[in-house]
Image (cartoon, coloured by chain):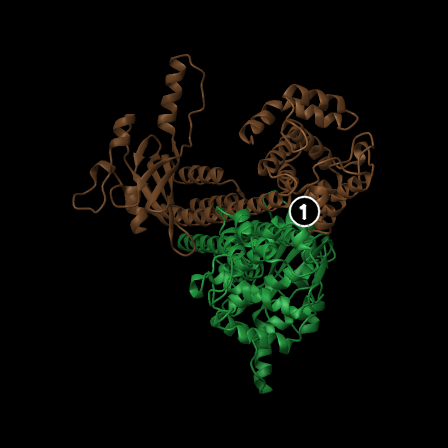
Chain colours: A green, B brown
Amino acid sequence: MPAKMTTSGLQEQLMALNKIGIALSREQDLNQLLTLILTESRQFTNAEAGSLYVREGEQLRFSVTQNQVLEARKRAELKAQKKPLEVAPSTFTGFYVSLDKSSLAGYVGVTAKVLNIPDAYKIPPGREYKFNRSFDEKNNYRTKSMLIVPMKDASGNVVGVLQLINAHKGKSIVPFDKHFENLVLSLASQAAIAIKNTMLTQELKEAYLDTIFRLSVAAEYKDDDTAVHIHRMSRYSAILAEGLGLSAAEVESIRYASPMHDIGKLGVPDSILMKPGKLTPAEFKEMQNHTLFGAKILENAKAELLKVSEQIALTHHEKWDGSGYPRGLRGEGIPLSGRIVALADVFDALTTKRCYKPAFSLEESMKIIKEGTGRHFDPKVIAAFNNNLEKILAVKAQFSN
Amino acid sequence: MPAKMTTSGLQEQLMALNKIGIALSREQDLNQLLTLILTESRQFTNAEAGSLYVREGEQLRFSVTQNQVLEARKRAELKAQKKPLEVAPSTFTGFYVSLDKSSLAGYVGVTAKVLNIPDAYKIPPGREYKFNRSFDEKNNYRTKSMLIVPMKDASGNVVGVLQLINAHKGKSIVPFDKHFENLVLSLASQAAIAIKNTMLTQELKEAYLDTIFRLSVAAEYKDDDTAVHIHRMSRYSAILAEGLGLSAAEVESIRYASPMHDIGKLGVPDSILMKPGKLTPAEFKEMQNHTLFGAKILENAKAELLKVSEQIALTHHEKWDGSGYPRGLRGEGIPLSGRIVALADVFDALTTKRCYKPAFSLEESMKIIKEGTGRHFDPKVIAAFNNNLEKILAVKAQFSN
């Protein structure tokens, strides 16, 4: 057994644990979060390998795995074969373990007990749990000491299992110090709650986005019954925003806000919206008012996303040379979000069939857009479009009518 | 100075800190979170009082304060005066401190330094910071030892200041042990991040709700231009849900979902929606289809909220006796959410002026609703309505046309 921990060792742990806590609270991306938890837990306990399972119904999903021995071996093999030294993948998903006593992780998942096993090959007979050697045999690996703890959320529900393998003391593999048990358990619980919070935030964002899409699609129902138009528009706009170097938060705002660009059409009478022939000048004027009505629906909002959507609703028919509507703004006087959506909207209208026109070919559409550069469209947005044409065409192919 | 901490003392702290970390990650309500942070920090350091300031622009808002000496004195006074022993308020808001060196909290907020002061009345001359005695003088209190730490988020920005006052060792007031500085600092940072996360989640929820309201109001624009109808409906529905004993999460779902109950009217032609006279049977049939169209807009969603809104859109015109539409469901065959919104919708229609009718008085409206009990309305929902009439009338008054 390792020596009893000293006061200064404990203080170091205390600070390390706090740093982990802070890192956990900060991390928004679930996969990065899980990887971080595992990495930090291994460093904490000096473990050469580990896995993290997340509960999904009656199964545990093998979410992250790390094994510095196998990773080093892989790198050595690649070097010997003079192959490029890819980074050995440390994350893979999709492998499941049943939530029952047929595996050590499953046992911990079911019972919520901690297992601290000095040697996985010498588990005394008569225990309720047993070690499955298949991974070791397949990979020519030797699992020895193991520390397996449940990840419990605030209500005490097991949401996952954290498994650490082969604690080191210098070059030798030693059992996991009993003092680590509570520490790793606390860390795992904190992680469990962070995971749950992250999931809740992700669910909330997805629900929000889904709602925006559904209501935006419904609002355009009478004008254009192709729901995919809204989805394409949103994605085109996000690609352009990204291509223009906007921040991740700004790109997300544009992604969420752009579906609402035509929400003001709710204020346009059916007789104009659904008129088969050409609109009279008076009718066209009324149709143009959808920009003003859209901005009115979205005005005075606190949320950044809705501010951006108001901007887009108001300005997505302005043109770079000042010949657009409703205000005749020109150049950089038009908000960038409006300039982005203007191009996304026109590109989508050109390349798809509408009740008043057939779909133009990509060549024709690109020609029309090129002609509009500096007249209808911001040359910088056009550049972002050309630089990201591959991504845009992938979206077009994915969301075809 | 207190004795150096022992190993077992440190281990206890380690566990306590973890418990706090877990509690922090769990807490969703910001005020409860701030109170918890302060309470736990005080217990940790054995401090008799403390305050927590949250940064708002160039000011610090005095968000939570606790003082067990003043609270005990207040209770003793009330007892002596034979007045009811109210719980002394431990939370008050609205008092601001400038974010500059004119106060100790402001100094820490500006410099992000830790101040550990043995006696606030004996700060050596020439220091950049000084103690303001006005609180002590006003309350006949003696501040002695103080530990004031910045609350820094993950990017190192100061989002608040945590101030602890008068550490105890038995009955005597002692300086704060230096070992506590880093601990309290870590805890404050973790709290800062939790606060930021909570704020982000709250902002996201508010943005979501705001978006639902705006788009729902816009969708009903042609049929009913009173945006307040949607707001009243949502609140009436939430009051009824709460009165029926549903969980906080279910109440919130109904609050968010009910504004979308008539979203299917987007699929009804203007000529029917805006017809001044009585609808023909064929037109009425088409109008009724707004329930089916609404459910179609919202179908197959992953989010619980949208599932509830689909249910509501589909069933809010069903009647308890089976005479409603579109399915003629009866009794508990109608989802509870639909039964709730049915009453909220009718009550609002009765008590407000519509293009086709004047507003009925409360008496008339209540009479009509009573007559509908067991025929149009679920008797249990009617009971919840009657039991919560005061709240309902408060909403009616707050959101009048």
| Local secondary structure at mark 1 | helix
Identify the residue at horizontal 56%, vertical 30% (top origin).
B400
Relative image position of residue B21 (x, y in whole percent): 49, 46
- The number of discs equals 1
Question: Residue A377: x percent and y percent?
Answer: 51, 69
Q: Is residue B311 above or below residue A220?
A: above
| Whether residue A113 is visible | no
Depth check, front residue: B378 or B346 = B346
Q: Locate residue B329 relative to residue B112 in the image: left or right.
A: right
The quadrant of the rendering that contains the C terminus of chain A is bottom right
Q: Is residue A88 above or below residue B81?
A: below
Residue A394: image quadrant is: bottom right
Q: Residue furthest left?
A: B125
Between A277 and B231, the residue placed more toward the observer is A277
The crowd level at tag 1 (other Cα within 10 Å; few <14, some 14-19, many 20+) is many
User: In the depicted view, which residue is nearer to us: B26 or B329?
Assistant: B329
Left or right of A82 in this view: A132: right
Q: What x and y, as percent, mark residue B75?
A: 40, 20
Left/right placement of residue A291 relative to residue B267 reads left
Q: Quadrant of residue A347?
A: bottom right
Q: What residue type is labelled 1?
A: Leu
Query: Could you tell me which chain the residue with mark 1 belongs to?
Result: B
Residue under label 1, please give it. Answer: B306
A319 vs B150: above or below: below
Answer whether residue B140 is visible to the viewer in this image: yes
Image coordinates for residue A110, horizontal then vertical, percent: 70, 50
